[in-house]
Amino acid sequence: MLKRTFGLGIIVLLVLAMLSGCGQKEAKEIRIGVFEPMTGASAAGGQMTWEGIQLANELYPEVLGKKVVLYLEDNKTDKNEAANAVTRLIEQKKVVAIIGSYGSGLSMAAGPIVMKNKIPTVGCSPTNPLVTKDNPYYFRVCFIDPFQGKVMAKYAYNDLKARTAVIIRDVQDPYAVGLAEYFKKAFVELTGNPDSILAELEYNTGDQDFTAQLNTAAAKKPDVIFAPGAYGDAAIMIRQARQMKITCPFLGGDTWEAPEFIQIGGEAVEGAAFSTHYSAQAPGTEAAKQFVEAYRKKYNKEPNAFAALGFDAYCLILDAIKRAGKAEPEAIREALAATKNFKGVTGTITLDENGDANKSAVILQVKNGKFVYLTTVEPD
Amino acid sequence: MSTHANKGTLRIIVVAAVMVLLLAWAQGDLRFIGIGPWDAYFVRILNLAAINTILALSLNLVNGFTGQFSLGHAGFMAVGAYTTSLLVMTPQMKKVVFFMEPMFEPLDRICIPFLPALLVGGVVSCVFGILVGIPALRLKGDYLAIATLGFAEIIRLILQNVRRLTNGALGLKGIPQVVNLWWTFGAGVAVFLFIRGFVRSSFGRALIAIRDNETAAELMGIDVFKHKLLAFAISSFVTGIGGGLMASLLTTIDPAMFKFPLTFQILLTVVLGGMGSLSGSVIAAFIVTFMTEFLRVVDEPLQLGAYTIHVPGLRMVIFSALLVIVVVFYPRGLMGNKELTWESLSSPVSRLLRRRVAS
């Protein structure tokens, strides 16, 4: 009897779910879909991005006199779920534009679907160049890996006067692989010495022991070590390096910008420098200051780059709708593609022919247990 | 006897006809009479459910029928998916995708139709299955699980590191989306019939004997190792096909997709349906796929009077809770090791009819 009741319960639940899923509310509103990993391995990144998007929606709830409504779908850090989520947003929620997703792989799963349905989509932090390649409907507000790799190579060459480097990269992470590749290219070009990269070493996400890689690196006596990868791995690596009396500076990418980087690394990460999307301390970024203030007030904590990029993605779409004068996907796409000098929190954004953001990067350094703004690097 | 057989054939023809009609309607092949296609979201879930069915069936053959606890499924899927994708991608697309390091010489110009590519994917996966199976199947229980899990990780690491073959961690994109409902359901039905036939044959009976008592089976003269290896090879072939179909449905793959949670998700489906029940695997694959999608409703903001409840990710909590409840009430899975038959379907209906007549 219990079994039957239970079985019946499940059927009723499923039917209810189906019915409510099909229900369409008729309203004069502009619908923007969001697909981000709210659960699964990348949940932290997805949730931070969502916080930024929500904040933007609260500050700018209207465009063209219509209310903007956000529809969030979780993609569970799973490609199939990402494709499902985007299809649901398009087919059932009838959104005119989409924001997402943290994680390049998830964005690439959505790519062909938004292209087929002609729905413009803006990625917040997918940095893999393949995301926007050959897809006129995919844009992004972050810079891509090649640019970030170049920025750090320039910084190492010009500011640190480094002439040799060792790369220790996370081979599992497309982001780290891309950054390392372009750092190498740019650094070799700057130094004019094809052997200026003394060694390219690899590790896997979550490794705890880096002594093998660090020993090899130390033996080469490089001027700098470039180690793009997750903040946790990098912090442990730098700690071990300092214990092994390796004193050369460590450089990294925007993934290092997390309070945990300093918590785990402690004194060892003092002086470590990395490129990232924005800094509230940078001069001339009124928007960033306002954003940080509003974010602190709402969430009672410090925002990071992902929240800022989420904020920018929303504002960019709103700006495009305003410029297009109507909330139709094709019109929004054209306006997005024509974006020039959009003043965002994370810098001034111009979208190039691929739909990639051409914008400045800032370099931060750890000083006295805090991220301190060093310099801004403009795109070429 | 002959009328009995006729009745059976008729039933199969009717079911097949209904299925073909429904698929044609859903796919939009009946547009000429003004109906269909169905909502693209629903069709996508159907496709996914059919692919998950294929994956669950193949895992069930090894884990449920042969009783060998293998956790290498994600690895075989990866082999099938990558082989199929690299064969069907156009040379132009390969050039775009392999922008960091060019692809290996002859392979960057090879481009073959989807069906042969899919089969090659299955065969390559099968070869890997045999290569892994020969040493691994000498192990039992937990040790086999660990060995196969290790194999899947090795495959993933190879995919990540051989950048000139797989584009490394950046993954592939632009895989032609050939699959539709005909492909996924066609492959699903073919795999179901094939595995059912296999399980019912003398090979299948031997597999079940090995599962129930390996020593006794060996005493009866069954070559245990050969049978295990055969089951493993078939399972990896089918898994490779499933991987290829999924790659074509998604049009993009990367090594991070084929981590352990993928195997776990298929294992969950098999256990939910019942280890050793083919129809159980089919039912569970559809339930799991549809449930996670339908439960998206609870992720949405809910207006309760003056309060708005919005907990993104709540659906996974509810989904897990439902699984726990199912396991409590059906500890051996929804179907146990029984199959869904016409009799088991019709008996409650006829009982209900009889009761109605009696009252």
Image: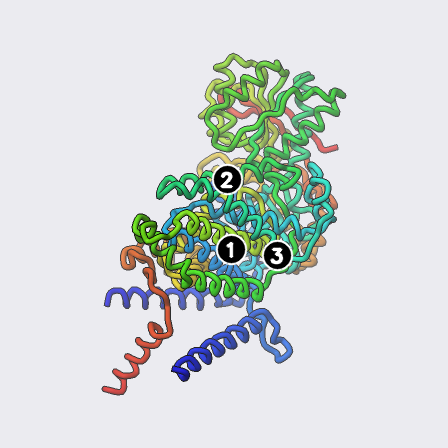
The residue identified by callout 2 is A295
Report the chain holding disc 3.
Answer: A
Q: Secondary structure at mark 1?
A: helix
Circles 1 and 2: CB atoms closer than 8 Å: no
The residue pinned by badge 3 equals A113
Which numbered dot is residue B111?
none
Q: Residue at x 71, y 28 (%)?
A: A185
| Picture quadrant where residue B4 is located | bottom left
Q: Secondary structure at mark 3?
A: helix
Q: Quadrant of residue B41?
A: bottom right
> Callout 2: few (<14), some (14-19), or many (20+) C-alpha neighbours within 10 Å?
many
Three-letter amino acid code of the residue under disc 3: Ile
Cα gap from disc 1 to disc 2, whole angstroms: 51 Å
- What is the x, y in percent for residue B128? 53, 45
Mark 1, residue position: B238
In primary-sequence order, the first of circles 3 and 2 is: 3
Q: Is residue B131 above or below residue A270?
A: below
In this picture, is A377 found above or below B103?
Answer: above
Q: Secondary structure at mark 2?
A: helix
